[in-house]
């Protein structure tokens, strides 16, 4: 008993100092006004009320929340779909398979700071590579990081009608750029899917081929159901990761969340409230709301998982 | 999974397009970093530079206190790798090879902490670090790694479980205590797993931006990741230098990746973490 505790003592100390105490302290401070210098002063639910009152507005917590929801709603499903498709392709036994795999995986190894510097350049509205590529397929150049309006927003209707009357179609904004950069780094999800695909028994495909199933049917009726536990895992991890996105938005916007607050994600807003405005109470309350929202989202995902996740019965 | 011969050509075509799209940004980053600023403005995406401006690299190194940043990064990496491998191996041994009451619960808690977002603990940890006088010290980032990291404890525990009981039994007959078993049998047998943990921690520390942003404010203490970000705002009109600096910063990670590709891939596919 004693030996076991001794071996585990580093983690025990860490658990108490870096998890238990922070949780208690953060909960207490979220009910206080606290600027790091003066003692925390009890204000009850004021911080939470302020946060709730900002929901639905385009400032503070409300803006950060809607930005984060937009980013997560777009980047998480896109990463799953593109990740699964890429993994399926990369599992085909063709010559040069390992080269293709390496090339798709490599972007996800690039340090986020370096990747952000690269994308700042690629997304340049005047001579960026991305706009160059778009012009190749006949699309108008996009403003990317210089535009606060996102593609999937109400105002895009006006842009579309302007396009019909001959104006250039400038749909994509800074958050869409962030989604693009995220999808570029999908490689580590692909690796997880690839590992899962190689675990699918070949007999299933052989049986399907005997019945004359096409490649698409095999993908839809064998690969997808067999991958569903991993897709579920990646959905949960992707959601947690997208809500925590910090370094890329910090570098892309130089820590400001600009243009027009469109890159002000919850993590950045939380960081700035705490360490620029020294509103520790307000920031702590925000972290708790964030925690509860993430918890609810995860539980909902778990609840729905029984309808679509197919767990193999152990043989 | 797709086997018919007739399907081959379009699969190869799609693979070719996909890998070209994914690797093109990296290719233009490298070629861009070797162009003069004049050429970069005139012809940003020609894949082969007309004249190879190797001195971009030298210039980018000289436009920031590179040696200071690099020294700090190395200090951080060494400290964090030592801290993590040591503490996580000890804890993983305690959670796998020493029977004690409450072990299952402790392991459950380790797993639970993996899923917690950093937001809630950020401010209290900052206060704690400042209170013990570590603000603006590299120890603010190194010290917590000596207290274990859930993902790596998990990884090592799974590995230690696979070590045959007979080996430990033999050690016990020879009179080894748990401490002796840990150092003389478990650690030598676990070198690949420990290397995986060390590698992941190294890359994580090398890339880390949030930690230095939070805890360091003296430019003499900045590591590369943070110094590079500061470089962006002051050199935004010198793209060739920015690209060269980004390539230099990325290079060690890429080299490590190619040297230890298998370890990277296996580590990610077993735990789902990003290196």
Image (spheres, rainbow, N blue to C red):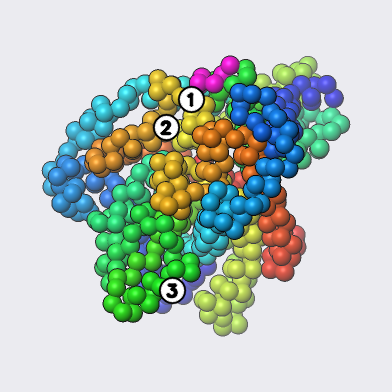
Q: Which residue is mark 2?
A: B226
Does the rendering let one see residue B46?
yes
Could you tell me if the residues under marks 2 and 1 are in contact, i.e. CB atoms within 8 Å? yes
Magenta stretch, residue numbers: B133-138
Q: Residue at x 37, y 33 (%)?
A: B230
Q: Residue A283 shows which numbered tag?
A: none
Q: Which residue is mark 1?
A: B216
Q: Nearer the viewer, mark 3 or mark 2?
A: 3
Residue B201 in percent (x, y) is at 53, 33
Q: Nearer the viewer, mark 3 or mark 1?
A: 3
Whether B77 is among the magenta residues is: no
Say if A260 sits above or below A304 in the image: above
Q: Which residue is mark 3?
A: A157
The foreground one among B183 and A220 is A220
Separation of marks 3 and 2 at Cα, in angstroms: 40 Å
Whether B134 is among the magenta residues is: yes
Separation of marks 3 and 1 at Cα, in angstroms: 46 Å
The foreground one among A314 and B136 is B136
Residue A231 in percent (x, y) is at 61, 60
Could you tell me if the residues under marks 3 and 1 are in contact, i.e. CB atoms within 8 Å? no
Q: Residue at x 32, y 24 (%)?
A: B65
Left or right: residue A59 versus residue B254 is right
Which chain is indicated by disc 2? B
Secondary structure of the residue carrying numbered label 2: helix
Separation of marks 2 and 1 at Cα, in angstroms: 9 Å
> Does mark 2 fall on the same chain as mark 3?
no
**Which image quadrant for residue B119?**
top right
**Which image quadrant for residue A27?**
top right
Which chain is indicated by disc 3? A
Secondary structure of the residue carrying numbered label 1: loop
Residue A38 in percent (x, y) is at 64, 24
């Amino acid at each position: 008993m004693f030996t076991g505790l001794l071996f585990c003592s580093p983690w025990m100390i860490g658990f108490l100092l870096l998890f238990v105490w922070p949780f208690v302290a953060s909960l207490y401070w979220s009910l206080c006004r606290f600027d790091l210098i003066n003692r925390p002063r009890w204000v009850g639910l004021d911080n939470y009320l302020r946060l709730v009152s900002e929901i639905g507005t385009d400032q503070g917590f409300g803006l950060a929340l809607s930005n984060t929801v937009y980013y997560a709603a777009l980047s998480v499903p896109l990463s799953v779909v593109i990740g699964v498709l890429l993994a399926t392709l990369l599992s085909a036994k063709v010559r040069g398979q390992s080269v293709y795999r390496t090339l798709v995986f490599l972007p996800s190894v690039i340090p986020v700071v370096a990747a952000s510097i690269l994308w700042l350049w690629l997304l340049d509205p005047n001579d960026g590579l991305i706009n160059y590529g778009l012009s190749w397929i006949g699309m108008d150049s996009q403003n990317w990081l210089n535009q606060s309006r996102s593609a999937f927003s109400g105002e895009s209707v006006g842009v579309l009608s302007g396009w019909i009357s001959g104006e250039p179609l400038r749909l994509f904004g800074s958050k869409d750029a962030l989604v693009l950069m995220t999808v570029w780094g999908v490689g580590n999800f692909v690796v997880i899917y690839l590992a899962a695909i190689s675990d699918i028994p070949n007999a299933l495909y052989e049986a399907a081929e005997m019945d004359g199933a096409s490649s698409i049917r095999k993908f839809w009726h064998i690969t997808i159901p067999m991958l569903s536990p991993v897709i579920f895992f990646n959905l949960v991890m992707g959601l947690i990761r997208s809500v925590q996105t910090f370094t890329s938005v910090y570098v892309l916007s130089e820590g400001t969340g600009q243009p027009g607050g469109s890159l002000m994600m919850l993590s950045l807003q939380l960081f700035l409230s705490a360490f620029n405005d020294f509103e520790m109470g307000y920031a702590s309350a925000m972290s708790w709301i964030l925690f509860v929202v993430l918890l609810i989202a995860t539980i909902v995902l778990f609840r729905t998982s029984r309808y679509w996740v197919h767990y193999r019965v152990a043989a | 999974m797709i086997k018919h011969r007739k399907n081959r050509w379009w699969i190869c075509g799609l693979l070719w397009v996909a890998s070209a799209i994914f690797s093109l940004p990296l290719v233009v980053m490298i070629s861009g970093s070797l162009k003069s600023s004049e050429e970069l403005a005139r012809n940003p995406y020609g894949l082969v530079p007309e004249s190879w401006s190797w001195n971009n690299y030298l210039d980018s190194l000289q436009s920031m206190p590179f040696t200071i940043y690099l020294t700090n990064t190395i200090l951080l990496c060494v400290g964090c790798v030592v801290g993590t491998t040591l503490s996580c191996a000890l804890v993983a041994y305690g959670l796998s090879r020493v029977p004690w009451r409450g072990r299952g619960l402790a392991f459950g808690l380790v797993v639970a902490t993996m899923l917690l977002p950093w937001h809630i603990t950020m401010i209290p940890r900052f206060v704690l670090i400042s209170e013990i006088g570590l603000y603006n010290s590299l120890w603010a980032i190194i010290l917590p790694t000596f207290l274990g990291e859930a993902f790596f404890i998990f990884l090592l525990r799974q590995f230690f479980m696979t070590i045959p009981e007979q080996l430990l039994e033999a050690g016990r007959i020879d009179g080894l205590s748990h401490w002796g078993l840990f150092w003389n049998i478990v650690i030598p047998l676990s070198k690949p797993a420990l290397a995986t943990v060390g590698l992941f921690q190294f890359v994580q520390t090398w890339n880390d931006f949030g930690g230095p942003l939070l805890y360091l404010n003296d430019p003499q203490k900045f590591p590369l990741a943070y110094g590079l970000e500061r470089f962006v705002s002051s050199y935004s009109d010198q793209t060739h230098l920015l690209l060269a600096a980004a390539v230099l910063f990325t290079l060690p990670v890429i080299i490590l990746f190619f040297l230890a590709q298998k370890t990277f891939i296996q580590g990610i596919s077993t735990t789902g973490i990003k290196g």
